[in-house]
Image: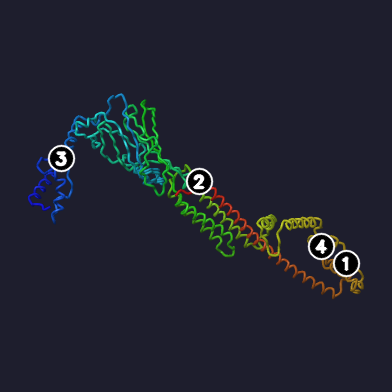
Amino acid sequence: MPVQFDQLKLYEENYYRVIEAIISNSELPKSPGLLDVSISLPLVINGITNYIPPFPTCYLHTSLSEQGPHEKKLLNALLASYNTLERPVANESEPLEVKFGLTLQQIIDVDEKNQILTTNVWLNLDEKNQLLITNIWLSLEWNDYNLRWNDSDYGGVKDLRITPNKLWKPDVLMYNSADEGFDGTYQTNVVVRNNGSCLYVPPGIFKSTCKIDITWFPFDDQHCDMKFGSWTYDGNQLDLVLKDESGGDLSDFITNGEWYLIGMPGKKNTITYACCPEPYVDVTFTIMIRRRTLYYFFNLIVPCVLISSMALLGFTLPPDSGEKLTLGVTILLSLTVFLNLVAETLPQVSDAIPLLGTYFNCIMFMVASSVVLTVVVLNYHHRTADIHEMPQWIKTVFLQWLPWILRMSRPGKKITRKTIMMSNRMRELELKERSSKSLLANVLDIDDDFRHVPPPPNSTASTGNLGPGCSIFRTDFRRSFVRPSTMEDVGGGLSGHHRELHLILRELQFITARMKKADEEAELISDWKFAAMVVDRFCLFVFTLFTIIATVAVLLSAPHIIVQ
């Protein structure tokens, strides 16, 4: 439908008059066509090409401004004689009941070291400083006797929004606050209803102290209290009650990557102090959180287990490689670095030792012990017969019983229980035999019956018949060699042929003794090396078992293992 310019001008004038009335909060002027602005103006604008109104296109309803003067009149009536210092009760002998609740939004930080909890009531636990930082919306609801009206007298106005500095409000603060400004709330408007009910919901970032228990770190649960109460009113004047008996509202909680929220129960406490006869009421909310252990499990525990397994592999490294001791010391330093990482995140308290710290100390003790035993292994491996003689207890433990227990064997020697018993029996017999000999027989390594030499046979018997009588010659010759003094008893000595044989036998005996000594030294060195190998194998089994038991004991003793 074509639109005339005069009609458009009329609509535009009415449009400006409506906007001016809304801005000035005054009554709309009564003029023809004004009530049609909400319908006609958009049609006119859309019906004219390239026409841009000076204000955004909108629908205007004159009925919206009809409550403006009623609210103004109501505010003037309520606040004209209102006193913000007056406790709003009909009977001053009765306490004013204030329903208190809070909505936890997010855990911002948990400062464990300073033991402070900061809440928006957002939740963040600073373990190093032992602080809890949370984002919280407080909720205080009470009934103000001086703020009641009949809504029918004021155009149906049933509620108002009034700034808190114009009304009386309870001076509820958090007792265990660690904030520099003490109160971290934002002052929002108070919603007042016609029955006198007042609702005050100030959001805020709360920083509260929190006693951190590091006993089960990183498998720990923390309970952080937030104590709220009136700062000046006692229980006879102001009675705090829980808005919800189940505790805080968690419906809008935003999950935290480090902490899992278990619950937030609330409790009302009435305390009578020694200084004052009046009871004091407070409401305490306990934020129960559980640490998510997945990060610590894969970034601290798993690397620690891998490093300790490398220490176990050090026992399989040959002593001649030259890196056996270096590997153990390097692993010990690596564990020290991991332990420092744990210490930096925890408070400097002596109340308890964290579980992870106990585990790291056990592994460090194991690695340090492995370094000490590696030194023992290297010492055994490089011992020589000229300097060290193997004690009998080392032979018994490291060459017989431990190899048999560990199922170890030496080339050419089979170690069984039977061979061990036979070896011990032979050693006992040898000791008995030596104890029964005379001193000279032990020195010369001969039997006692060689001390008594029978009268020598005649020369013909000694030099003649070498057939069946050769045994007599060999016996006499052995006696003459073993005891050279008997050569004088023969009455003139032996012939030159016998002298040469005697010298040859002495040289052979010397060479045999040297070879026997070399074999004994080589066997002793081999025994020391085998003892070092046995110590290595024994340490490998013992420390492997220790690592497994320590790891399993730590995981099983924790209240929970993995919380995602």
Which of 434 and 179 lies nearest the eye of the viewer? 179
Residue picked out by circle 3: 25
Q: Is residue 30 above or below residue 367?
A: above
> Between marks 3 and 1, how big is the CA–CA gap?
153 Å
**Label 2 sits on what residue type?**
Ala
SS type, badge 2 = loop
Residue picked out by circle 2: 558
The furthest residue to the front? 1
Q: Quadrant of residue 484?
A: bottom right
> Between marks 2 and 4, how big is the CA–CA gap?
71 Å
* Nearest to N terminus: mark 2 or mark 4: 4
Residue picked out by circle 4: 446
Q: Residue 241: x, y in percent? A: 35, 32
Which of 509 and 160 lies nearest the eye of the viewer? 160
**Label 3 sits on what residue type?**
Asn
SS type, badge 1 = helix
**Is label 2 in contact with label 1 (beta carbons under 8 Å)?**
no
Horizontally, residue 508 falls left or right of residue 195, namely: right
Horizontally, residue 242 falls left or right of residue 494, namely: left
SS type, badge 4 = loop
**Is label 2 in contact with label 3 (beta carbons under 8 Å)?**
no
Residue picked out by circle 1: 489
**Label 1 sits on what residue type?**
Asp
* Nearest to N terminus: mark 2 or mark 3: 3
